[in-house]
Image (spheres, rainbow, N blue to C red):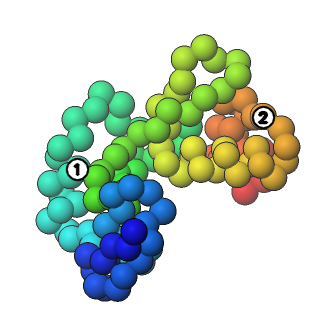
Amino acid sequence: MKYVCKVCKREFTPKSHGDKYCGKLCLAASITDNEQLITERKFEWSQSHCKICGRHKKYLIHKRMNGEWYLWQECHYPELRDPVLGCYFCNLWEKEYRKRNKKIITLEEHKKLIRGQDGIN
């Protein structure tokens, strides 16, 4: 099934059901300043910073290809029973680290690596 991108009006095959944009460039182009401000106010979370990288939540709000907005993702670590609410960047970084290095990382190791506390960054 083909869809028409809301930004460039090109036909595309969606990767997921409900995608409104043909790719990341059109997704980024679809975000207006006003929409960003309204969305920032909409997210009333008790957590104001990512527990992994420490970035403030206003820098972590993302728009999905289907047009919906989200803030936190559940990050799972084997040493913890409950997931940690982390940002999209940290979740993606951990996934890529696991794929490249073929090993699971702990929450503390992740914090040190992503914040550059071991002199790696």
Q: Is residue 97 left or right of residue 115?
A: right
Q: Which residue is mark 2?
A: 104
Secondary element type, mark 2: loop
Residue located beneath label 1 in the image: 40
Q: Residue furthest right?
A: 102
Tell me where residue 107 sits by quadrant.
top right
Q: Quadrant of the C terminus?
A: bottom right
Q: Quadrant of the N terminus?
A: bottom left
- Residue at 60% of width from left, 29% of height from top? 76
- Per the model, the C-alpha gap separating discs 1 and 2 is 33 Å
Question: Can residue 12 be seen in this snapshot?
Answer: yes
Q: Crowding at label 1, few (<14), some or many (≥20) Cα neighbours within 10 Å?
A: some
Q: Is residue 4 above or below residue 76?
A: below
Q: Amino acid at mark 1?
A: Glu
Q: Position of residue 4 (x, y in %)?
A: 30, 77
Residue 40 sits above or below residue 72 on the image: below
